[in-house]
Image (cartoon, helix red, strand yellow):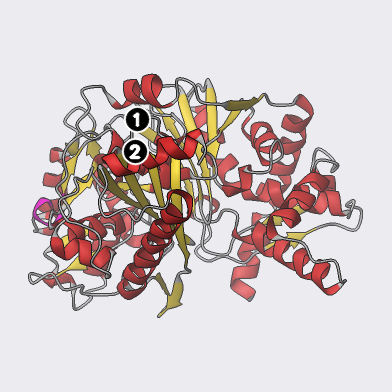
Amino acid sequence: MTLRQSSGADAIRSGRTALGIELGSTRIKACLIDADSHDVLATGFHDWENRFEDRLWTYSTDAVWAGLQEAYSGLVSDVYDRYGIRPTSFGAMGVSAMMHGYLAFDESGELLVPFRTWRNTNTGPAAAELTDLLGVNIPLRWSVAHLRQAQLDAEPHAGSVRFLTTLAGYVHWRLTGRRVLGVGDASGMFPIDSAARDYDRTLLDRFDAHTGGDLRALLPEVLVAGQDAGALTPEGAALLDPSGALQPGIRLCPPEGDAGTGMVATNAVAPRTGNVSAGTSIFAMVVLERPLAAVHHELDLVTTPAGDAVAMVHCNNGASELAAWAGMFGRFAAASGSPLSSDAVFETLFGEALDGEADAGGLIAYNHLAGEPIAGLDEGRPLFVRTPDSRFTLANVMRAQLYGVFGTLALGMRVLADEGVALDRMYAHGGMFRTAGVAQRFLAGALSAPVAVGDTAAEGGAWGIAVLAAHLGSAASLAEYLEDHVFADAGVRVVEPDPADVAGYSAYLDRYRAGLAIESAAVDAL
């Protein structure tokens, strides 16, 4: 056993560990870390996909628990394979998940309608009404927009709602019995007063006066990073580990959203820092120095896990269309008799993109599998567009596809720049940044800002929620804890924006914006 393995085994035996579990859009991942060094000790995962049923995107609660059990079981197996230990407890743990959406329960705790995810765009009338009523942007995917839309549509269940939460809040509730939520995740349910670190009381009163209800009574209690959020119950332990080996009593940190864990995973919780998280969706978070001057439909106002104000540019569509193209090329390689692993396919195609023209040769790629509010689209139609004189090469095709991942995000970030919000550095994480120097370079060009990628980029939010669990009970603020204890010696690769890439992406984005009319026509026609 190596020195590193010996240290990891000692941490596991002595309980100096933190377990983070994140339910992402396509993968549920469990990540075990050393609570002192914050090094990854083991991982487990389960792949899953949302379903489009009755014109709504959803995951079943059965799929939630089956996926959590497989991810946890895989982590235990990984621990055994690496260290010869089968853990039955951990020093602390935490749960994170995709933000927003609608999980509504009745008085007896029964789910009233299937989980409605962040990806749904049927809440337009409610979001517009609430934005006007509250004076802040209420995006389509926010939980309060889903609730209000159900009321406006007179859905039969609407009058029976007694508890409303997010996916992370639901899992945490079942594991601990506590109906709580981290402030970052709560900020995707209803606007937060950053001074109070709680829901905005004035806006709650305004909502209640308008609807005749008591919204606060339906929402989870808000907690900030470092606060105790309960302990694993015997029932919760059995849900996560049906084998019965996992012991109850483990302390849990506040459940958080994937935006907050992404900020933690990239040390982007201080003013003038930001991060980009790329997966099925893609979003940017920028910690604000001052309030924004105006309301913008492209920008959400959310918070860090500590409650500090953040401007968020959230796009429903991220790297899924890019992955579909890579899958097609991977199949071609296999059919030709030269099969490649998935990682090798991405590495080859990303490398080819580096040889593409700065403006992608006049090609445009739209990654809209679902609706995209920032782009004004209620539904998505992925498209690849070129003119007869575009330079149709593999290098330009792949650069256009990579550029397309950042297209809608760049539109939103232009609005933030027009507000005078300054950035010292953007941190990026997500699987597409594993191939060094490609997506990172193109993002720097798209945002005209330095982009940093750390050693934890691929682990992402599961590592981030594990760090939040390790921070549980610390006397240090979250920013201090990350700076002094987590990232003090972390390896970070920074790419400065290349002027040619900045100019090329600007030209690409002009075509991209103009071509949104093609997207709208495709939605109407197909």
The furthest residue to the front: 1
Q: Is residue 447 above or below residue 130?
A: above
Side of 393 where 410 appears, left or right:
left
Figure quadrant of residue 331: bottom right
The disc at residue 11 is 2
Position of 93 relative to 169 (above/below): above
Q: Residue at horizontal 69%, vertical 54%? A: 343
Q: Position of residue 347 (x, y in %)?
A: 74, 49
Which of labels 2 and 1 is toward the front?
2
Please tell me whether mark 2 sits on a helix, a strand or a loop: helix
- Which segment did they paint magenta? 216-220
Label count reads 2
Can you tell which quarter of the image residue 524 is in? bottom right
Q: Residue at x 48, y 69 (%)?
A: 49
Quarter location, residue 44: bottom left
Q: Amino acid at mark 1?
A: Asp
Q: Position of residue 323 (x, y in %)?
A: 65, 60
x, y percent for residue 195: 20, 27
Tell me where residue 502 appears, x and y as whole percent.
72, 30
* Prevailing SS of the magenta stretch: helix
Disc 1 target residue: 36
- Figure quadrant of the C terminus: bottom right
Left or right: 1 in relation to 179: right
Q: Residues within 10 Å of mark 2 (few under 14, many from 20)?
A: many
Q: Nearer the viewer, residue 148 or 120?
A: 120
Q: Is residue 25 visible?
A: no
